[in-house]
Image: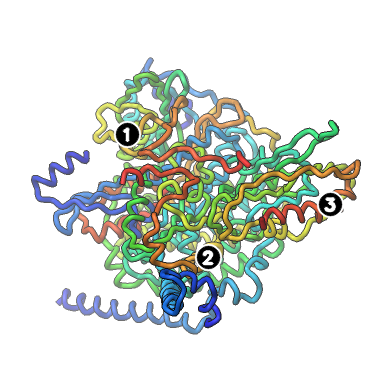
Amino acid sequence: MENALNKQAVSDDLMILNMGPQHPSTHGVIRFVITGDGEVMQRAVPHVGYLHRGIEKLAEGLPYPSFVPFTDRVDYLAAMFANHGYAMAVERLLGIEVPRRAEYLRVIVSELNRIASHLIGVGAMAMDIGAFTPFLHGIREREKLNDIIEELCGARLTYNYIRVGGVSFDFPQGLDAKIRAFLDTFEPLMEEFDRLITVNEILVKRCANVAVIDAETAKSYGLVGPNLRGSGVDWDLRRDLPYSAYPDFEFNVCLGRGFRGTLGDAYDRFIVRVQEMQESVKIIRQALDGLPEGEIKGKLPRKLKPAKGEAYGAVESARGELGYHVISDGTDKPYRVKIRAGSFNATSIVEHASRGLMIADLVVLIASLDVIAPEIDR
Amino acid sequence: MGSVSTYFENVKNAAVTIFEGMAVTLSWMFRRPITIQYPDRTPEPVKDTLPDRFRGILEVHIPACTACSACARACPIDVILVETQKHPSGKGRLLMRFDIDISKCMYCGLCTEACPTGCLRHTPVFEATGRDIHNLVVHFVDGPVVPYKHKKGRPVPASPPPGDIVQALLKPWDAEYVAWSPGEFVERDAGGGDGEKGAASPGKVEGGATGSGSG
Amino acid sequence: MVEEMNSPRVIEAGLEGGPGQGAVLWGKASYLLNLSRKHSLWYLLFATACCGIEMMQTGGPRTDLDRFGMVFRASPRQSDLMLVAGTITYKMADRVKLLYDQMAEPKYVIAMGSCASCGGLFQKSYSVLKGVDLIVPVDLYLPGCPPRPEALNDAMMKMQDIILSEDWRRKMTEKTEPRPQMGRGGILKRA
Amino acid sequence: MHFDEIVARLRERFGDLVGEADEPDPARPSLLPGVFVRADSVTDVCRFLHDEPAMAFEHLSCITGTDFKDSIHLAYVMTSYVHRQVIALKVKLDRDDPSIRTVEEIWATANWNEREIYDLLGVYFEGHSDLRRLLMPDDWVGHPLRKDYQEQPDYHEIPTTRENPLGKY
């Protein structure tokens, strides 16, 4: 492939430009080899694996519960989902029920995490386009969320909170009120954020009609989450393959709808994230109101030894379907854990979607897909 | 005609949205900043503002440690080393070493959940930068000690406030690495390790351990 | 400050050609140089994994690093300090070395977090570099997974202490080799 | 459509090519149901599952490659947006010379998934447009997810081990 690329470059006088792996706008260590005719790209080929840490192989040597902290590092911007997906897969293998209260707590922390992740997502997108301020606003709000989650589970990024069979801690005294207070201040701040950047003419002009991905292509490339919904496919695991306590809540599934209907462009993906934060606020409020009393951890044997079988646990993470395919051979260690993450597919589409874009728009494309490196490489 | 009006519409939009964005930014000038003046100008030390559950650097309260190695087994990445030996008198065991490699630790909290007496815990200490990575191995036992024997209905020896033990053991950040070697076993009174002795011994053990820390 | 300038450490740093008036003068000049270097420590925005997020948070509004004159630079040519924030894989190791070589002397490295220090929780993994000190010399090791922003802040201040206490000329002529006790990086040998 | 019906439809259409299917486990109702097919029929079966309106598995979640010491299994985990269902299609491959037809033309995402499996397990995909290593460096030796994978002592002269500071005094 690379050879073919080079040959073509020589014959057609194309320019080959390397971007990454250390580049501030690639969102982690990803490398893009851009073949361009001047400023217009023929394609940008992603080269990944610079953060391949072999998490799947490590899982094979660890008992089921001990692997949970490793899943934190699969998606460091929204580690709750990574915990949750794995816990769900193992619970399905074991065939155990999780107490209602634990499910509600899982939903609350997941949605808080979704807000935290999208804040970085939209902030970083604005930063890549050239507006630094929204990123700082995002970071500032994220600090408050980090404080809340730290009070709940003791860590800011790598939570190890959602365990197999339940969650590790109950709400400490007064956290409920703190979350509500945060939500009360967060909603006006979101309006302010919209005024600051979402309707900003420069951002709209920069994102609209850039890197259009139509619904068929999105499905074919296996895009998930906000990227898929930005292309107008109405699919959300929380609603369509309900898990945890999500059937109890009312929320909308946001679809990309720019000013002229769904296009699947960068702005649609941006706006989906902004709206999803507001939906998350709604879900958290409902979950706090309806938080049932009871246990936070199901009854588990001392040593987890699921019988032979395969389970697939998928959650709607901030970056879409985050699935764990866990294969058990009857021992206390998983035989194989396959992690299916949204960013993997989102990066694979870059080669297709970057055709004919300007080089400067590649940054917009990458940022709008909201990819993070460890989800691609694992 | 249409294109001209679109043109001016765009110009107007650009001006209005930029003005709005700038207004938002400017309004933050008159709000309370959230910057904390770490390290010395915070109202109270950052360490004290951290929540109880904060998972900082690990510490062991040795007088309450039963040397059961549950923590070492629970650790997925072998950060904890607990070494025991037979007591010279042939009765019971001796805790020879209790080392934690804080440079490798991932602060997941699995070990503290496994600890039966709660002597292993996360502390609010987070500043442990060092020039030499070998200094980031914390030796909690200076010489062989008799492990604590837990009996039902007896309170576990009271421990100092979290963070004090490990703070004393952490070497200065620019210290040269000095190879660690275990001290001699000091025979205590018979029945050492029961409740009262356990509660009385922390001063002794800690004193010794601190000595090694500074040396 | 005057007291600090007359401290033996500062004067010693300037004792090149024997004790004398000139040495003291040089000592003070060196101190001033170090002082200015210390307060404009620009770090390379080199985020590979989880620690990178905490690094951004540290640069963010709460633990504002700008207070110390530290700003991030995306280009290694403009930075004095490389914060290795996150896991380094073998595929990435060559690039890290390249980035380090591109930085201008005098340069410093902080290994932030467990992965950069010694491989951390991925030490058993087949693809992770077991400590960035195998390929570049590391000045400070910062434990944590990831460390809190305040911990990074603390490490940065210790970095400032190092800068203040050393002679920048000596730092430049010093051989930039990995710490001997940790084995040698192969890339260095090849270069 | 229930999983049993899907298997029945597949058997009706492809006959012997379809192998054993997972029985439902009453104690664990939410396990991933899977059905084995012969390796040489995988493109036809996938095409059928993707195109047939009653199935409409438009979304390939992932391809899981597993080394079962005597053979290598691939599991195509797929989701139907219309029918809200997840199933796995499995194939068994020879471990010494694993090779299978690509499904890239059905789901474009298979391209990268297959590259990953080629990289980590050494399965060859016939007809793949761009079969290179995806995650590991190009000069890497071996396929890490194989159960008998041996780590090299060094990579580009960087040692792959580190002494454990806990091991010595």
Looking at numbered disc 3 in the image, what kind of residue is underneath it?
Ser
Q: Residue B163: where, in percent of width, then height?
A: 70, 59
Disc 2 marks which residue? C158
Residue C70 in view in this figure = no
Residue at x 48%, y 41% (from the top left corner)? A323
Name the residue at the bottom extreme.
B30
Report the Cα–Cα distance between label 3 and label 1: 75 Å
Q: Residue B133: where, in percent of width, then height?
A: 54, 51
Q: Nearer the viewer, mark 3 or mark 1?
A: 3
Label 1–label 2 contact, CB within 8 A = no
Disc 1 marks which residue? D51
Q: Residue D101: where, in percent of width, then height?
A: 30, 26
Classed neighbour count for the residue bearing mark 2: other residues with Cα under 10 Å, few (<14), some (14–19), many (≥20): some
Question: From what the image shows, is residue A223 above or below residue D144?
Answer: below
* Left or right side of D93 for A334: right
Disc 3 marks which residue? B201
Residue at x 34%, y 47% (from the top left corner)? C94
Image quadrant of residue A47?
top left
* Left or right side of A9 for D29: right
Looking at numbered disc 1 in the image, what kind of residue is underneath it?
Asp
Foreground: B5 or B209? B209
* Left or right side of B106 for C106: left
- Quadrant where the N terminus of chain A sits is top left
* Left or right side of B77 for D92: left
Q: Residue B60: where, in percent of width, then height?
A: 72, 50
Report the Cα–Cα distance between label 1 and label 2: 63 Å
Foreground: B81 or B181? B181
Foreground: C31 or A145? C31
